[in-house]
Amino acid sequence: MRAAFAAASLGVLFGLVLAAAEGTGSDPPAPSLQPWIDATPSGGILQLPAGTYSGPVLISRPILIDGRGEVTIDGGGKGTVVTVRTTGVVLRRLHLRNSGDSHDRIDSGVLVEDGQHNLIEDNRIDEVLFGITLQQANDNRIVGNRIRSLALAPADRGDGIRLWYSMSNRIERNELRGVRDITVSNSLRNRFVGNSVRDSRRAMNLLFAHRTLIEANHLRDNSSGITALNSEGLIIRRNRILHAIDASGAGVALKESGTTLLHDNEIIHCAVGILSDSPRHAINRMAVIDNRIAHNVTGISFYGERGGHLVLRNRFEHNLWPALVGAGDSDDANQWWGNYWDGYQGFDLDDDGIGDTPHEVWAHADRIWMETPMAAFFRNAPALEMLDFLERLAPFAPPTLMLRDPEPLSRQPVRGSGR
């Protein structure tokens, strides 16, 4: 049964008593929100008058709070602004601000602990260390929130969204800016759809986050895009990842994360477009299909002698170096097929859209900086360019075949057409 009127009446009484007890200066302190929450029965709706209320607060039974964009909860620089330790809470259209600054306590705008089926929707969360934190919290929805961390150096900020041992949550259409990372640790089967992350460190940082869906997100101007470690069965599709151009920046970086699908992403202007090692088991293939990989320093970098990547129908455009494959002394164990390479030099005499000869990438003078990383400083310098030209004319050492695409596309495919 809804008890909005009773909750509001009792809350007003508590607020007035506290305000009177705390002083009568010209700028009285904001009334505490906790008495209003305590007066709201389980399943009730708390309808707050417009204004600012002080926290931190704890919600321990299911209630709905809709701030209508007119209610601010100020944590006073201490701890977490709103802590939820129950099931079925709705926090909507609130402005949450001014958390503590302790990484040890994980001071957050909202912390959900051991709670399920909660909805955190359309809130503005700023001047907080961590934005929204889920700890051992399953089947929650985090939708349409705007999150900013404290104005600190990137490594000193908190995570915009942090999941720890939290399963089957849906994180959708949130807008994060100036945070550290989105961190997903020991958390399975979560969905990240339609989010935007800008001006942060790692847009998404996954560790033991098996079977995560990352779809239709916009990740721009971060040090790195998506980083995954020991996370199997990822689906990464229809994302736009731009300008991860730091020295160690990658659009997508995968380590020991087999059975992963990268499909229909745009990865543009990154230090490395896709960086990946070999899967631990041959059956755990990594599929890279229908992506646009453009204007990166290195388009794709595969390291590890076992190969294990299936690379189909991708567009490689205007990358300084399209692909590096660290196959050691063995042949390339990856499969390349039907990709578009802007540097393809063959013909398509029958005009079927497929080149008449395979596309091959050989390493000539480039072996110098590949084998001696310090020499990368001189990459594309006139001396190395001349040396590479001479190597191609009359090689004084056998070049290394980096990859071979037997059926390269001779013209750019239309995105989403499969050709």
Image (cartoon, grey):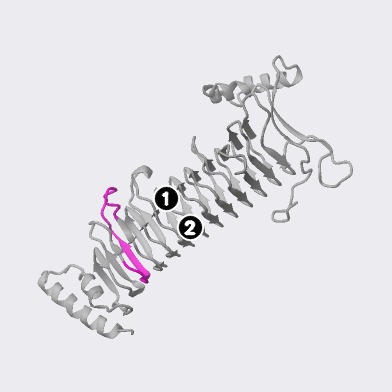
Q: Position of residue 242 (x, y in %)?
A: 55, 47
Q: CA distance from mark 1 to mark 2?
A: 11 Å
Left or right placement of residue 76 versus residue 71 in this view: left
In-front residue for pair 85/67: 85
In-front residue for pair 44/352: 44
Q: Is residue 106 found inside the magenta-colored segment of the image?
A: yes
Q: Position of residue 187 (x, y in %)?
A: 43, 53
Name the residue at 38% across, 44% down: 154
Q: Position of residue 5 (x, y in %)?
A: 28, 85
**SS of the residue under disc 2:** loop
Residue 97 seen in the figure: yes
Name the residue at 23% across, 74% down: 38
Query: Which quadrant of the structure image shows residue 380?
Result: top right
Sort mark 2 into few (<14), some (14-19) or many (20+) by Cα contacts within 10 Å. many
Q: Which residue lies most toward the top here? A: 396
Q: Quadrant of the N terminus?
A: bottom left
**SS of the residue under disc 1:** loop
Q: Which residue lies most toward the right here? A: 350
Left or right placement of residue 301 versus residue 166 in this view: right
Q: Position of residue 304 (x, y in %)?
A: 58, 32
Residue 161 seen in the figure: no
User: What label sits on residue 131 in the rendered view?
Assistant: none
Left or right placement of residue 217 versus residue 130 in this view: right
Query: Disc 1 residue type?
Result: Asn
| Residue ID for mark 2 | 190
| Residue ID for mark 1 | 186
Instruction: Please tell me whether residue 381 is drawn above or below residue 138 in the rendered image.
Output: above
What predominant SS class does the magenta segment belong to? loop
Q: Is residue 105 found inside the magenta-colored segment of the image?
A: yes
Name the residue at 55% across, 21% down: 372
Q: Are marks 1 and 2 in contact (CB under 8 Å)?
A: no
Q: Which residues are magenta?
A: 86-107
